[in-house]
Image: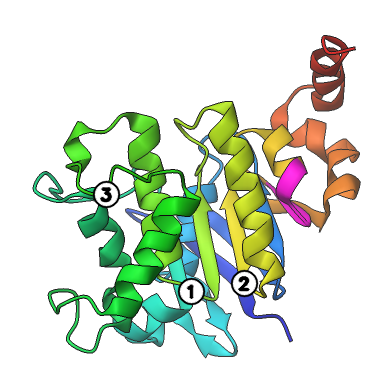
């Protein structure tokens, strides 16, 4: 049984449908990427699946439970979302460690303002190390570069230790070394039985990490299948309005 099932989701903003009748499943230990042009609805779909915006019809289920009906604290133990902006609100007074520890609130008996347990601190230290932030634990996040800040929010999402993590452009602001590290971390994450739904602007990155890719155009799912199948499909060019394979090959030729 898939860990996650999205059924016939239609949703949008201000009465206008952005996503139209989209369905997909996610298996345990799998990375599914959503691909398509800017504005096609990828982020809206992620937000709808996570229960952050209402759906007009359909729904998303984790282990058979409707995600939007799951209490927020319990939901945070099952799913995590890293948005394109990383986080909302004012974090100016928080250090890197403070921010990553926020990912542990659902697992703390007293909630987000309770004292962190040794287990919480160990988890935060683990993901700070794995995202290459050692030595910055006490730095205010307002003092960080864009790439460092993105890694802080990645570490916070991983620190939730959810079953499914939703990543919306997680490689934004990351240099090549950190993108490579992120790819390796995602592979390790799913090898431990976790699952990922990701929006990756870079098709090369998506190809490197994904088990399956779903193409989206104008709010509709065009094709969903194994990575090689999708990247060699005619639908890929249709979705992006250009010869993607020829472009990728022209780039690869530089390295020959």
Q: Is residue 25 left or right of residue 6?
A: right
Q: Which residue is mark 2?
A: 194
Q: Which residue is mark 3?
A: 137
Q: Which residue is mark 1?
A: 162
Q: Earlier in the sequence, mark 2 or mark 1?
A: 1
Viewer-closest of 2 and 154: 154
Mark 1 residue element: loop
Question: The magenta stretch spans which residues?
Answer: 208-215
Position of 254 relative to 65 (above/below) = above
Q: Is residue 124 magenta?
A: no
The reply to whether dot 3 and dot 1 touch (C-beta < 8 Å) is: no
Viewer-closest of 247 and 158: 158
Label 2: few (<14), some or many (≥20) within 10 Å?
many
Cα separation, mark 2 vs mark 1, equals 8 Å
Viewer-closest of 170 and 71: 170
Q: Quadrant of the N terminus?
A: bottom right
């Amino acid at each position: 049984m898939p860990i996650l099932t999205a059924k016939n989701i239609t949703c949008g903003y201000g009465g206008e449908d952005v996503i139209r009748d989209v369905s997909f499943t996610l298996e345990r230990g799998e990375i599914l990427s959503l691909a398509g042009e800017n504005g096609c609805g990828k982020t809206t779909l992620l937000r709808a699946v996570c229960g952050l915006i209402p759906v007009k019809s359909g729904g998303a289920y984790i282990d058979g439970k409707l995600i939007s009906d799951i209490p927020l604290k319990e939901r945070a133990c099952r799913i995590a979302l890293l948005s394109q902006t990383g986080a909302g609100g004012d974090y100016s007074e928080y250090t890197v460690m403070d921010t990553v520890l926020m990912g542990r609130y659902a697992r703390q008996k007293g909630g987000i303002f309770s004292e962190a347990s040794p287990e919480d601190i160990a988890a935060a230290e683990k993901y700070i190390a794995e995202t290459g932030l050692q030595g910055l634990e006490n730095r205010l996040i307002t003092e960080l570069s864009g790439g460092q800040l993105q890694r802080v929010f990645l570490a916070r999402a991983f620190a939730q230790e959810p079953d499914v993590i939703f990543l919306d452009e997680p490689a934004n602001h990351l240099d090549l070394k950190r993108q490579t590290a992120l790819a390796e971390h995602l592979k390790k994450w799913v090898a431990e039985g976790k699952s990922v739904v990701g929006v990756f602007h870079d098709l090369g990155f998506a190809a490197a990490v994904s088990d399956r890719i779903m193409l989206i155009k104008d709010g509709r799912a065009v094709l969903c299948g194994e990575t090689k199948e999708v990247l060699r499909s005619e639908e890929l060019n249709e979705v992006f309005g250009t010869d993607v394979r020829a472009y990728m090959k022209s780039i690869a030729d530089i390295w020959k």
